[in-house]
Image (cartoon, rainbow, N blue to C red):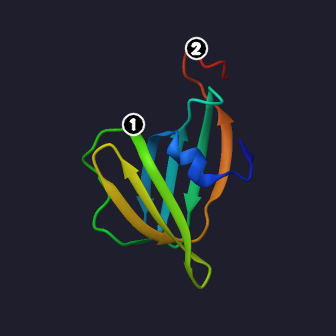
Amino acid sequence: MSSMVIDLEKLLDTGMVNRFELRGSVLHLGLQTPTPPGLLYELTFSDVRPESGDPPWADPLPWGVVGFDAHLSSDLRWAFVLVCDEFLWEFQATWPTAAVSASSLPGSGGA
């Protein structure tokens, strides 16, 4: 898996969330995008503070992303809004780290 700088809003606006794991104050968000095909993105947000209630634990993955917004809030913290097919979830966190890898899904050309 290699690290990379990404356009977070563009990536999330076209992706499918295939992993959502909130452990303590760290959120691991896995995404698969239609272009380029066969790539999986892993975003790790630290110091997460939910703003709009509970994450949608009951909704089965993957989730289609309808929209995503990010803006600088204060003290180098960012406010994020993740809008999927059936829910909206707002949280604050530091800017995420990102890694990308090839998908191992059949027909994806990955390893």
The quadrant of the picture occupied by the C terminus is top right
Q: Mark 1 vs mark 2: which is more N-terminal? A: 1
Which residue is more in the foreground, 32 or 65? 65
Residue 65, picture quadrant: top left
Q: Secondary structure at mark 2?
A: loop
Reading the image, the residue beneath label 1 is 62
How far from the left and from the top, in percent, is residue 87?
29, 52
Report the disc number at residue 92: none
- Any part of residue 24 in sight: no
Q: Which residue is mark 2?
A: 107
Front-most of residues 5 and 57: 5
Q: Is residue 89 visible?
A: yes
Determine the residue located farthest toward the top in the rendered image. Answer: 107
Vertical placement of residue 12 versus 55, above or below: above
Split into 4 quadrants, where in the image is the N terminus? top right
Residue at 67% over, 48% down: 99
